[in-house]
Image: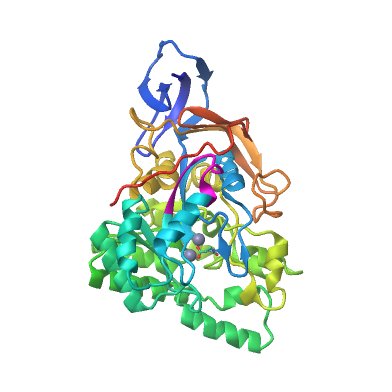
Amino acid sequence: MSKVILKGGTIWTADSVYVADIFIQDGIIKTIGQDIQYQADEVIDLAGKIVMPGGVDVHTHLDAPVGETTTIDDFASGTVAAACGGTTTIVDFATQQKNQGLVETVEMWHEKAADKAVIDYGFHISVTDLYEGSMTDLGKVVDSGVTSFKIFMDYPDTLMLDDGEIFRVLQAGGRYGAKVCVHASNGKVIDRIAEDLVYQGKTGPEGHLLSRPPATEVEAVNRAIAISRMADAPLYFVHLSTEGAAYALAEAKDHEWPVDGETCTHYLTLDKELYFKPDFEGAKAVLTPPLAGEKDRDALWKGLRTGSLSIVSSDHCPFCFEQKKIGIDDFRRIPNGGSGIEHRIQLMYADGVVAGRLTPQQFVDIVSTAPAKAFGMYPQKGQIAIGSDADITVIDPDGVTKISAETHNMRTDYSLWEGWERAGRIVRVFSRGEEIVRDGVYVGAAGRGSYLKRRTI
Ligand code: URP
Ligand code: ZN
Ligand code: ZN
């Protein structure tokens, strides 16, 4: 029976900010109040610190085959990095390979994560191959707690589903109460533009940007919304990057259609100019959809403030520079993905709250509460309330964080935010009441994370 009191911190939740003590027993928040005097094994003074629900990152790719390689962080390194960055729950994408069963895919992801993950984790299933019986298998997957599916409108030769198949998966989602997550980019058009660029000798990383103009995202978003109306099923867009997409979601919300979406840390903070860096450096920013421009960033921040977008995820899909060099002669072969699981909360705190773009409540909502609600984990996760898991992140507002590949915990040998210095420092992290990060260093046991069987929506 462990008993801990977190004393005098300033508690930030998605709807309030107040100073209080938190009493934790056996990993659960038991009491929140003023000057709690219960017997405890430990009393931790958090006066002057921000105390928020642990981050919930619903978009990661750990130990995942992508293109011709595999992401460099596994469930051990990736979740340690997540924890050090204040994230206490992830939902990772279990991606079906062609000719692989859906149940088998989820089993494979359980093997990857068990005994390695140090924070609690769930899975989405990425559906890429509709075999006979696949819809029945989706039902079994949902029963096991994997209550969201991802579909691709991109990568025609490997992952893409056609419109009829998307319709079927949406219908299944509606039937089983599962959320369908859409990667919205018009893959067929992208492939044609990319082919032309290579034919013209434009084989460098900037080809990734040029082959994916904003309209390839906006068209796919609008098409997916239309198909979801036909299937009468809810929809969630992953990694939205453009002004047009943010507007399409605002319009869908105006109609009160059940359409929701996320953007990612990199779309809010980085610019497409990175693709033009010399010496193949632009490859480090090859992720999909590509980084965009200032007016897109402004629209995404506005979307988060007004509610057309509700979540910021990392889309952590990490590769070392050497892996990116697979595409040295042809940008189409550069593995798509960036690494950001560790700095999502730090950057949203600094560039969101400190920069005056988000209120504390909006910040907590988009990095913790809204993702927990959207994916069947609330109020166990994403909340500081009596009965919730004591997953708690402590930020020192007087601290400073300097981002560098030399000091981060991810296995990537570069950072897209290299050298960025930002206000605030994540100093302590608790997962189910256990202190797992102290002074920014992981101090928990190996493999202590638990699988989260998520609820349907
Ligand atoms: O570039 C990205 N986003 N890679 C990860 C796979 C995906 O589409 O989310
Ligand atoms: Zn995607
Ligand atoms: Zn992704």
Q: Is residue 365 visible?
A: yes
Q: Nearer the viewer, residue 11 or 330?
A: 330
Whether residue 428 sits left or right of residue 5 in the image: it is right
Q: Establish if 23 lies above or below 384.
A: above
Q: What residue span does the magenta drawing correspond to?
A: 112-123
x, y percent for residue 302: 42, 56
Q: Establish if 362 lies above or below 25.
A: below
Say which quarter of the image contains residue 287: bottom right
Whether residue 209 sits left or right of residue 219 in the image: it is right
Q: Which residue reaches farthest right?
A: 279
The quadrant of the picture occupied by the N terminus is top left
x, y percent for residue 318: 61, 57
Say which quarter of the image contains residue 336: bottom right
Q: Nearer the viewer, residue 445 or 207?
A: 445
Q: How many marks?
A: 0
- Residue at image point 29% right, 73% down: 227
Q: Is residue 257 visible?
A: no
In the image, residue 302 lies in the stretch drawn in magenta:
no
Colouring style? rainbow
In the image, residue 114 lies in the stretch drawn in magenta:
yes
Whether residue 60 sits left or right of residue 221 in the image: it is right
x, y percent for residue 156: 48, 78
- Residue at image point 31% right, 67% down: 135
Q: Nearer the viewer, residue 301 or 382?
A: 382
x, y percent for residue 283: 67, 67
